[in-house]
């Protein structure tokens, strides 16, 4: 358990350090704007619910964990 927490912490730190570069990268922008994501923009109000993005990320992470446990 301790090893997984360390790995998760290192991944979070790496993602935080890489965030300025990732936010400017063009290939990364599609991940939050998939078909099926709910976005409502009105005057003075904005709501975004990335349901499809959440499902895709969950499937990818599940596949990675499944492959690591084999």
Image (cartoon, rainbow, N blue to C red):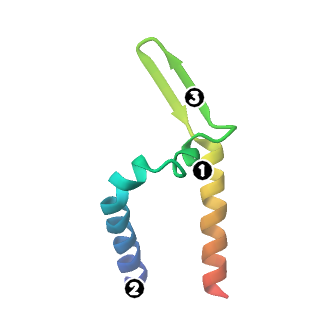
Image: 36 above or below 28: above
Residue 53 percent across, percent down from the top left? 61, 48
The earlier-in-sequence mark between 3 and 2 is 2
Q: CA distance from mark 3 to mark 2?
A: 38 Å
Residue 32: quadrant of the picture: top right
Say what secondary structure mark 3 lies in.
strand
Quarter of the figure with the N terminus: bottom left
Say what secondary structure mark 1 lies in.
helix
Say what secondary structure mark 2 lies in.
helix
Q: Which residue is mark 1?
A: 54
9 with respect to 33 (left or right): left
Residue 26 percent across, percent down from the top left? 51, 47
Residue 11 percent across, percent down from the top left? 39, 70
The reply to whether callout 1 and callout 2 are in contact (CB within 8 Å) is no
Residue 65: quadrant of the picture: bottom right
Within 10 angstroms of label 1, few (less than 14), some, or many (20 or more) residues? some
Q: Report the mark closest to the observer, 3 or 2.
A: 3
Residue in view at x 62 percent, y 74 percent: 64
Q: Which residue is mark 3?
A: 39
Residue 52 percent across, percent down from the top left? 66, 45
Residue in view at x 38 percent, y 62 percent: 15
Image disc number at residue 3? 2
**Which residue ends up furthest to the top in the rendered image?**
43
**Which residue ends up furthest to the bottom in the rendered image?**
70
Residue in view at x 61 percent, y 32 percent: 38
The earlier-in-sequence mark between 3 and 1 is 3
């Amino acid at each position: 358990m301790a090893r997984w927490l360390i790995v998760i912490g290192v991944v979070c730190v790496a993602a935080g350090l890489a965030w300025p570069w990732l936010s400017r990268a063009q290939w990364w922008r599609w991940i939050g704007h998939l078909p099926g994501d709910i976005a409502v923009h009105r005057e003075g109000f904005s709501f975004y619910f990335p349901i499809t993005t959440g499902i895709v990320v969950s499937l990818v992470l599940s596949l990675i964990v499944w492959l690591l446990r084999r």
